[in-house]
Image: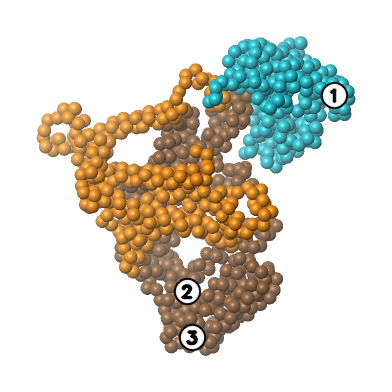
Chain colours: A orange, B cyan, C brown
Amino acid sequence: MTSSTYAVARSAKIRWHPALVRGAPVIVIVAALIVVWYVAAVLMNMGVVRDAFEREDTPYTTAQLIEGTLTAERPLLPAPHQIIATFADDVFGWPVTSPRSLVYHSWVTLSATFLGFLLGASFGIILAVLIVHARTLEKSLLPWIICSQMVPILAVAPIVIVVLGSIGLRGLLPKAIISAYLCFFPVTIGVVKGLTSPDPIQRDLMHTWSATPAQIFWKLRWPSSVPFLFASLKVSITISLIGAIVAELPTGAQAGIGARLLAGSYYGQTVQIWAALLAASILAMGLIGLVALVERWVGRIMGTRA
Amino acid sequence: MLAPDNARLAASTAAPPAALAVRARGISLTFPTGDGAVDALANVDLDIAAGDFVSFIGPSGCGKTTLLRVIADLERPTAGTIAVNGVSPEQARLQRHYGYIFQAAALYPWRTIERNVTLPLEIMGFGAAERRERVERYLRLVNLSGFERKFPWQLSGGMQQRASIARALSFDPALLLMDEPFGALDEIVRDHLNEQLLRLWDQTGKTVVFVTHSIPEAVFLSTKIVVMSPRPGRIIDIIPSYFPRDRTLEIRETPEFLNIAQRVRSGLRSGHSYDE
Amino acid sequence: MTSAWRRIAFLAAAAGMLAALVAPLSSEPAAGLLARPLPLAAIVLTALLYAAAGFVTRRLSTALALGGVVLGCIGTLALLRDTAIAGYAAWGFWLAVLADWGAAWLAVAGLAAVRPHDKTVARITDLAIPLLFGAFIFYLWEVAVRGFGVPQVLLPPPSLIAVRFFGSLWMLWQDFFQTFILGVLTGYAIGCGSGFLVAVLAHRYTFLGRGLLPLGNFVSALPIVGIAPIMVMWFGFDWPSKAAVVVVITFFPMLVNTLAGLNAAGHIERDLMRSYAAGHRQTLQKLYLPAAMPFIFTALKINSTLAFIGAIVAEFFGTPTRGIGFRISIEAGRMALDVVWAEIALAAIAGMAFYGIVALAERATTFWHPSYRT
């Protein structure tokens, strides 16, 4: 690794467009991964396809074999085009309210995600404010909150669902509660960091103006914590999505992306599983994008540098 | 890794003939930045004799640090030739002819002072016994004996900088390149370290190239003061100075000192260093 | 809290305690406190301690309050042994519990306000406060569940869970071995190890690094646990599929953080290495890796929790008849919630121990980082 100025002097020879410099490596690596995927699909599905041919006693050529690996019905590793095809089918091929549509399942999971995120983020923020202002809470509660994240909380998911189910709460709310439990922690930690981030000199200045704790909070601490808040909200919303998906697993839910994964796994529908995963990934990206959009809007109001 | 050549090391610390430690001709360096090209250095000619103490002085952006980095092969000039100890800067770097001291002490916080000083020795392949001996010798030279087992954060800023000087000296380079080493320290510590640096130079006879933006510091320490100015970075004046080698801080009030300082200042003014 | 308010608070706690002497303890006909000598003594003594705590110095009042809380908890728990009270507790009982709660809060607040000069005493206090707080929460859980008569299939009290825990140690050990030793540890080692190696490569070859970093960030945000059914399909029902899920989950955070750490060395330090004409391997060993340690340990800590979650969730998708996730989903379906809670307790202990070990290793190797020195 040479010093940065050295590198600048050297690359002065060719003028690369900055976006190309940043984008080219990613594109190359993604392309390479896709190639590797296709090769892996051929190799992994080879055995299954060959067995199928031999069972039917049909003669086959290598070309037919390869073609078979890329179009198998229950492949070990579906080829990318298969996944995209099934994904498109499940999204556009069915009416949006049908239980065979990925859009329907996505919506079920998303609603639990949003509710859980709302509950978790609000709780996280309130907890953070309390922790920053009450030293007792900081010393007694914060260690437990940190410990709570070391416990694989998804282990509690079945209990929450069963217990809430027995008092009549089913469907959306238990999933939202599990998501909320999972996603409040990053928000709490991030907001605590943000609320305590102002320089001591800033706090001293407030002190010289005899500001009340509430004034210090609204005029100094809260605005300083905004960048930390948004960073943790991005993490939190993806965790909420994971929580919603996993909450659908242990009780064999009928709707939602987790349910789709479960169904695909029970009935051996490999491509369906991959399509559901693709849907989940798109959802995750969309959620982060949403938070980033809100962050940019808030940033414009607060005069943050772009 | 090359084992140290004892003969070569002995030769570098012995009093050399009037050889040129640095010979630069027509050095230019242009940085392509987002706002257009910046001429950090334009056509710089400079000779530094072995055993000299040379200061580069000028405002920010005059190229003094850049010139030092060119000598150290940390930057490549876009034009011109330069020889360090008779070879190219890259050769000089590969042959470990110089020790570099930065504005910050840049000690590694996970190593004790002792292990920080032996860092270059480990890289250059010195044996364990030799490393121990050198650490002890050079820490004593900078008055840090007894602090071997301490960590950098346990030392004050001035002591950290002294440790980095010991580190730069530990492998006996012929040349010491120092980039505003005392800039971050308060004035009293700075005066103290100036005196210590002078003693060190006197005792070891090394060539020192010293970048500063403090006029009293430059005049006090140097045998030659190179006044530079920005936009583009160039040399305005080269002022020789003949104070006795055992001088103390008191000479800063003498008329001779003030004359040289005045000459430096007028050089800076003529280079528009005091303009907006 | 000013001493006037403290005094009032402590006196209120004492009054609440004494209320148990006269108010009904149970909605069923049951003997009042005056007929039970030992609980009576405990309650009265507690009330006295609370009252006294309102009138002495801060330090002493915290100590007295703590003593009173312990005594009060013992007293109320003893009362619950009476089946006439358990499940039917009335407001006399609850006033005593509330009084304990208030005094416990005051005691913890008193401890938190103490700022001892001695480092070891400060450390002990910092440890004691959450422990006392946690112990009190367990007490509240026990008292609430048994006092209100919450059905055990819904929420068992801690005492029952403890009994079930110690009664099923062999089963718990098998589940732990399956999930943690076989699934989590193997996956963690492989995932973190490969993430580290790829990061070192990506650091050496900038093109690779610039391509992998955005990809790594992207994948880290995805619901990776979803690949569990696919892993089961590839590696079978037993622990290799769980380990595979853990590998994928831990790989990306390790890659991203290690790469960030390797790039974290300051450019002055890098110039220094260049001035020594140090080769890439030397610079890696002496500068980049030590500087990256804080980042690497951040990833190791995150991964310790993610790995455990991944293994347990993967077990929801199919496993031989062992494993923490398996046991939880099966027993939850059977409404045997005490077994489920015992497994959760096991997972909690294992999770905290794992994290704690990594944190200790972190402290040993990154003691020099500023975040430890404030």
Which of the 4 image quarters holds residue C337? bottom left
- Chain on which label 1 sits: B
Residue designated by label 2: C143
- Chain on which label 3 sits: C
Q: Residue at x 71, y 35 (%)?
A: B184
**For the residue marked with disc 3, what is the amino acid?**
Pro
Q: Percent from the top left, x then y, of residue B107?
A: 66, 34
Q: Residue at x 66, y 69 (%)?
A: C2
Which of the 4 image quarters holds residue B146? top right
Q: Secondary structure at mark 3?
A: loop
Which of the 4 image quarters holds residue B113? top right
Q: Is residue C70 above or below residue B179?
A: below
Q: Percent from the top left, x then y, of residue B153?
A: 68, 41
Q: Nearer the viewer, residue C274 or C158?
A: C274
Disc 3 with disc 2 on a shared chain: yes
Q: Nearer the viewer, residue A108 or A224?
A: A224
Q: Residue at x 40, y 31 (%)?
A: A26
Mark 2 or 1, which is nearer the eye? 1
**For the residue marked with disc 2, what is the amino acid?**
Val
Looking at the image, residue C35 sits to the left or right of residue A101; the answer is right
Residue designated by label 1: B258
